[in-house]
Amino acid sequence: MSQHLEVWNHVRGIERLSLCDWPGHPSCVLFLGGCNLRCPTCHNGGLAWMPEELPAVDRTRVMSYLENRKMWLDGITVTGGEPTAVPDVAALIDDISCFGLPVKMDSNGMRPEVVEELLRSRLVHTFAVDVKGPFDKYPALTGGAATQEQASANMDHIFGLAAANPQSFYFRITKVPLLTKDDIETARGYLPTGFELIEQNFVPPGRNQHAQTDPEKRRMSGDVVSRSNRGSNPESLEVQRHSGPPAVQALGA
């Protein structure tokens, strides 16, 4: 249990109900802080690079919420940041697996060994993996955090896992300004046979200083930060995640 409690220190936000994070699955979304990339178009930069500035989510309240609402949810989405960069993330997934809800994890694919472990242990039902673009553009797309060679090796590992487990993966790409149509077609060509590359439109920042993607425009307003953090931190998850109406009452409030 001590291991489970420690990993909860990385949970920095929650959205009680999302209809767009996992298509076809109304889900609760847990946001994990920290990331191994530095993408200049990141829409959750504060969460990814300065998670210590956001309050940790109270485990007891989250577990109580999931217990009370599990009959109305079709799953739990674990996102970030980059969940696979969180030490012992499997312990967190194991903790929430007691509710019998399938788990979907968002990932950039740069830690395929963690994805493989979670897949092998059946802790994660579905992985949504972002393909940034052609491998030779990964250095620019990731803020210099991934070389072309690293991107190729890591994503090839992911694609191999997907080919062997086609029901457990889907792939996305955001059409950021650096990418051309040819770049997107190149990235599409990396995918194993039978897979579709879902294109997400890049939406330039408006009042929010972050890069939004298509699903965010359809996002319901939710509980991404605690009430005590609202209005006091301009880089809060509520600000970064969407620009919709004010969030409803905080979890447990």
Image (tube, rainbow, N blue to C red):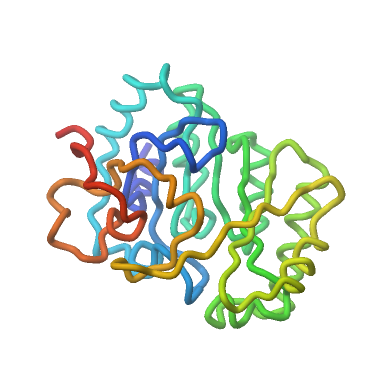
Tell whether 19 sits left or right of 176.
left
User: Which residue is located at x 44 percent, y 32 percent?
Assistant: 96
- Residue at the outermost top position: 71
Q: Nearer the viewer, residue 152 or 188?
A: 188
Q: Is residue 184 left or right of residue 237?
A: right
Above or below 208: residue 227? above
Residue occupying the point 68% across, 70% down:
133
> Hey, which residue is sitting farthest right in the picture?
193
Q: Quadrant of the C terminus?
A: top left
Query: In the picture, which quadrant includes the N terminus?
Result: top left
Quarter occupied by residue 144: bottom right
Above or below, 77 relative to 137: above
Q: For this view, does 48 lie left or right of residue 151?
A: left
Q: Residue at 50% across / 22% down in the picture?
A: 100
Q: Residue 145's x, y, as percent?
A: 56, 78
Where residue 184 sits, quadrant-wise, is bottom right
In this rendered view, identify the residue nearer to me: 175 or 34: 175
Q: Report the residue at 32% width, 63% height from top.
A: 51
44 to 61, vertically: above or below: below
Residue 58 screen position, x and y as percent: 25, 41
Horizontal and vertical percent for residue 183? Answer: 73, 73
Quarter of the image for residue 187 reads bottom right
Please tell me which residue lies in front, 170 or 161. 170
Q: How many marks?
A: 0
244 sits left or right of 99 in the view: left
- Residue 160: percent from left, percent from top: 81, 53
